Amino acid sequence: MSKTLNRLALMTMLAGVVALSITTVDARPGGSKSSGSRGSQTNVAPPKTNTAPGTAQPMNRTINQGAPSAAAAAPAGAAAGAAAQAARPSMARNLMMGLGAGLLGAGLFGLLSGAGFFSGLASLAGIFGFLLQLALIGGVIFLVMRFLRSRREAAMATPAGGMQRDAQPAQNPMQRQTLGGMMGGAATQAQPALQPLNLTGEDFGAFEKLLGNVQGAYSSEDVAALRALLTPEMASYFEGDLSDNEAKGVVNRIANVKLLQGDLSEAWREAEGEFATVAMRYSISDALLDRKTGRTVEGNLTEVAEVTEIWTFVRAPGEGTADWKLSAIQQVA
């Protein structure tokens, strides 16, 4: 009887562990993470909109790693000054060690010759020569230290005001457009962009179409279709998520995707391409199924939920509405 109870307890524990591991699996494209790149704006939160009034979460996965560390961004002059300051004690220590070694060598030579440890310094000429050498060495040390100090002070005196002024954003605010009609968002004031990009109703229609096509390709695990709809970076993330699902023996099925509301957060042009960041609230039925049995292990394909995300699209300069690709998905805090 006790063995049976122990076996049942063990099976219950294992079932709980399996259930916990399954419920922590992130479903739908992007895995409920913030992934991708927004060009030069990757590490800048997109402006809030009526559709997504919360703050967009920073990227969990991105090839743009942001600003360099404080050590890497330190001015070259300051780094050189620090190096010189660190080198001065070392140089002085080496000179003193050399002087001590010379005295020790002279004393040992005197002992070996039978004349005594300081016999080489007995004569007045020897003492005078020794003092002259000390003066010369001291003068060299003084000149070297003075040179290094002047170099450091010159580097520290270099003004940094020009870099700070250049870092200020442009003060030309761009009026945010709305997706209008079926996308239903309201216009609000946008933050300054690099170069404003005007969009048309065809662009907004392309964004809605991409929403459905990306969800469908992900649900059917159509890697070729995903690569045609996504940037290479986003395609690599989606393919990795699909591989994780396969390793866990589950498949993510999606249905009932419909855009409910959306508006444009910002649109701009830069050397890397043309970008449009759009807040979208859409309905979706989402579930993880067992690959072998088809049994639902998470979610529900018969229940419809609402999701609000911020999607960024990109195209090369001069391309048309059919060339937009998904560049990033951000969750809203």
Image (cartoon, grey):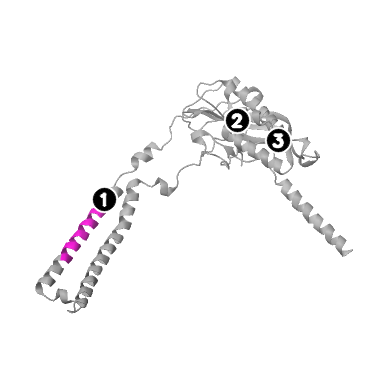
Q: Which mark is residue 163?
A: none
Viewer-nearest of labels 2 and 3?
2
Q: Secondary structure at mark 1?
A: helix
Residue 150: say if magenta.
Answer: yes
Residue at numbered disc 3:
306
Vertical relation: 273 (above or below) 292: above
Image x and y of residue 292, in percent: 79, 40
Vertical relation: 322 (above or below) 11: above
Disc 3 marks which amino acid? Answer: Glu
Image x and y of residue 29, in percent: 66, 36
Disc 3 crowd rating (10 Å Cα; few below 14, some 14-19, many 20+) is few
Residue at numbered disc 1:
151
Image x and y of residue 53, in percent: 60, 37
The C terminus sits in image quarter: top right
The disc, 2 or 1, on the residue closer to the chain's N-terminal end is 1
Magenta stretch in the rendered image: 133-153
